[in-house]
Amino acid sequence: MERMKILLTVGHSILKTGVCTSADGRPYDGVLEYAYNKAIVNRVAVYLRRVGHTVDALICPELQFSRSTDEKDYKVQQANAGGYDLVAELHLNASALHNGRGCEVLYISDAGKEVAQRIQERLATVFKDRGVAYRNNLYMLTQTKPVAVMIESFFCDNSADCELAEKTDVALLIAEGIHGGDIAATPEENRPTGVLYRVQTGAFAVRENAERLLEELKKKGYEAFITTLDLAGQILYRVQVGAYSVHSNAEAMRDRLLEDGYDAVIVQV
Ligand SMILES: [Zn+2]
């Protein structure tokens, strides 16, 4: 198997104003596109490195850019300077009526089409197969020198698609598609276990302290919430992120939070 130098990029960013430039499926029982992909990108990299590829993951800095076009300059420059064989950008789809479903991978070159088809094949084992699509109007495809694909793994604003994603190691499917073969995941990495995992970033006796952390996390695009625990009359306010039936999805979120400078431990619900 050919060893590649790969750049994984996460689509979109959070602007200075706190506005996230990605689709937001949360009002429709879905997920925030940007936060979802930010949470899985390192896991995709781990899987690809396991089979010998060299992988960098690129996420735009948060609360720094004034306009969404700043994302383009930031990513394209690094994509073209790194001597990469492949650039793969992670996205999720969304539709006007929130009823769109399935996976789709976008390409512009013949070489890109081959990679896109491999990824599409893997994602389509779980999500509705929308096929690969040629696109000549997206800067990550038109302005990058390496072979490039954009992956729309599923619809972030469709609860059925998001439920499927919750039970799936999407990062593994993407990695196997890029690699062009199976990658051995350890059993606990990708098996739905019937238990639910959350990532806890703090536990406070004072509710205001929990709320402060909650607001900060939400501003950064995390799906955070507060749960309470009664310890013999002493209420503990716990700030947690996500709800995962696949342990590796919880691990991906934990890694992301740790990298962002937060405490993060996986807890079983
Ligand atoms: Zn997108």
Image (tube, rainbow, N blue to C red):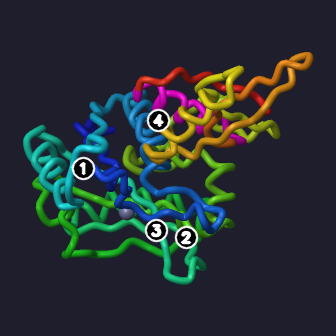
Q: Nearer the viewer, residue 69 or 49?
A: 69
Q: Nearer the viewer, residue 240 or 89?
A: 240
User: What whole-number distance in Å separates the C-alpha atoms at marks 4 and 1?
Assistant: 16 Å
Q: Which residue is mark 4?
A: 43
Q: Which residues are magenta?
A: 244-260
Asked if marks 4 and 2 touch (Cβ < 8 Å), the reply is no
Q: Amino acid at mark 4?
A: Arg
Q: Amino acid at mark 2?
A: Gly
User: What whole-number distance in Å separates the C-alpha atoms at marks 3 and 1?
Assistant: 19 Å
The 10 Å Cα crowd at callout 3, few under 14, some 14 to 19, many 20 or more, is: many
Q: Which residue is mark 1?
A: 87
Residue at image location 45% in from the left, 46% down from the top:
219
Q: Give the secondary structure at mark 4.
A: helix
Q: Quadrant of residue 6?
A: top left
Q: Which residue is mark 2?
A: 102
Residue 36 as seen in the image, left or right of residue 199: left
- Quadrant of the frame with the C terminus: top right
Q: Amino acid at mark 3?
A: Asn
The 10 Å Cα crowd at callout 1, few under 14, some 14 to 19, many 20 or more, is: many
Q: Amino acid at mark 1?
A: Val
Q: Is mark 3 within 8 Å of ligand 1?
A: yes
Q: Nearer the viewer, residue 269 or 181?
A: 269
Q: Which residue is mark 3?
A: 93
User: What whole-number distance in Å separates the C-alpha atoms at marks 3 and 4?
Assistant: 20 Å
